[in-house]
Amino acid sequence: MKVIFEEYSGIIITAVAIIALIAVVSLLLAAEGPVHNAFVDLIDALFSKTNVS
């Protein structure tokens, strides 16, 4: 086990970091996530200020 972690620790850390990054991005961009809600609010504000229906 020690040999495996000595040999492949960089690859293991990189894989875990990539999986964590994908998880965070998918949570933020989910249908009711904070980024989605902010974008929808921004578009609504833009349309209300330009009087476009």
Image: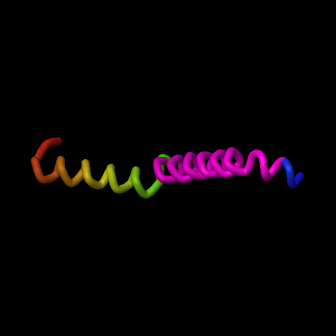
Q: Is residue 10 magenta?
A: yes
Q: Residue at x 71, y 48 (%)?
A: 12
Question: x, y percentage for residue 28?
Answer: 48, 53
Instruction: Give the image's coloring scheme.
Output: rainbow
Q: Give percent across and percent down for residue 36.
A: 40, 50
Q: Magenta stretch?
A: 4-29
How far from the left and from the top, in percent, is residue 33?
47, 54
Q: Residue at x 46, y 48 (%)?
A: 29
Residue 48 is left or right of residue 7, and the answer is left
Residue at 38%, 54% in the rendered image: 37
For the stretch drawn in magenta, the main secondary structure is helix
**Residue 12 left/right relative to 25:** right
* Count of numbered badges drawn on the protein: 0
Give the quadrant of the C terminus.
top left
As drawn, is 15 to the left or to the right of 51?
right
Q: Name which residue lies at 13% across and 42% down.
A: 52
Residue 36 in the figure: left or right of residue 2:
left
The outermost residue toward the right is 1
